[in-house]
Amino acid sequence: MFSKLDEVETRFEELTARMADPEVASNPKRYAEIAKEQSGLSTTVEVWRQYKSLGEELDSAKELLGDDDQEMREMAKEEIDSLEPQMTALKDRLQILLLPKDPNDAKNVLLEVRAGTGGDEASLFAANLMRMYTRYAEAARWKVDIISASATEVGGYKEAIALISGKQVFARLKFESGVHRVQRVPDTESQGRIHTSACTVAVLPEAEEVDVQINDLDIRIDVYRASGPGGQSVNTTDSAVRITHIPSGLVVTCQDEKSQHKNKAKALKVLASRLLEMETSKANAEQSDARRAMVGSGDRSERIRTYNYPQNRVTDHRINLTLYKLDSIMEGDGLPEMIDGCVAYFNAELLKGS
């Protein structure tokens, strides 16, 4: 592990020197590529240097254990007792930092939330989930742009798609994909009975132009008049756009903008990300081989997480983590603790296989 860390540090120093090269600095594209790689190594190098520095302090303290002065020996022992746990923690962190990086971790994401089993109650929970992710994103200083939203008459969503942009968005949100089950008493329930419903969440890395090329001959674009809940017209022009990708059969619609051109651009962005996810799934045997496998069907039994309102409880079934702070999680404030638990668990699983 330590020889690998030395290699990483050497590479970091090489990249730092190249960024100072006038020839590189005058080429914005090349400079950005080098700066991105250098930035990706910076945390590992910083922790590695901390580890080496503490190691030197620890060696010095151990040498003092043989000192003739008893007070000096006691001070050395106290320092060793303080440094050794820090060294262990840094070593554990370095092991995580050396794990193979997901190439999509630094990308923005398309977050898709869909109502599954449960009718109106599922659509209301879909709106709750979208609000939770939006508040979490805002706290992380990420930008949220609603791509499309299909509202219901009760104020929920049949489907909502948002583009979330910022630093390491996919790395933080990728484990949110799956079926989210809710247990609560609906406002319309007069007997006070708890109902169970579900929503599916899909987190897709935003596709860049270099990732996916969409041939104009492979798509069919239809325009139509946008409508709101109940079918009433909300637009007097044919601004809504439906794009069908003929080879894959994927269909994307967007009607949020009044401009047909803006709706087309947003729909193409969603299509590209879905195509990228399909290609990635085929290439990586560890991932699902179809988008449906990633999020399930929306059935109550296929869940990754359960939100129990009467008990103020959220349980992630994949990692056996239960937090009694549903109210805080739904506000976005408590979500980082749940996400941290998922990141730690899946990193530990990667370490087992490394």
Image: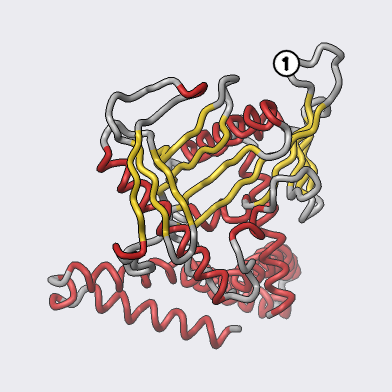
Locate residue 231, reporting x and y percent.
Answer: 47, 24
The residue under the point 66% across, 64% down is 86
Q: Which residue is mark 1?
A: 187
Residue reaching furthest bottom? 3
Frontmost residue, 319 versus 249: 249
- Examine the rendered structure and indicate whether residue 207 appears above or below residue 181: below
The residue under the point 43% across, 38% down is 148
Q: Quadrant of residue 11?
A: bottom left
- Examine the rendered structure and indicate whether residue 106 appears above or below residue 4: above
Locate residue 297, reporting x and y percent.
Answer: 69, 50
Locate residue 64, reporting x and y percent.
Answer: 67, 76
Left of 188 or right of it: where is 86? left
Locate residue 30, reporting x and y percent.
Answer: 23, 73
Query: Quarter of the image containing the N terminus?
Result: bottom right
Q: Is residue 350 visible?
A: yes
Query: Quarter of the image containing the C terminus?
Result: bottom right
The residue under the point 63% across, 40% down is 335
Left of 226 or right of it: where is 135? right
Q: Quadrant of residue 157?
A: top right
Looking at the picture, the colour scheme in use is secondary structure
For the residue carrying disc 1, how many other residues have a C-alpha within 10 Å: few (<14), some (14-19), or many (20+)? few
Q: Amino acid at mark 1?
A: Asp
The residue under the point 58% across, 50% down is 202
Q: Quadrant of residue 9?
A: bottom left
- Examine the rendered structure and indicate whether residue 117 appears above or below residue 194: below
Q: Is residue 72 visible?
A: no
Provide the secondary structure element on which disc 1 rests: loop
Circle count? 1
Frontmost residue, 342 versus 246: 246
Frontmost residue, 34 versus 5: 34
Left of 175 or right of it: where is 137? left
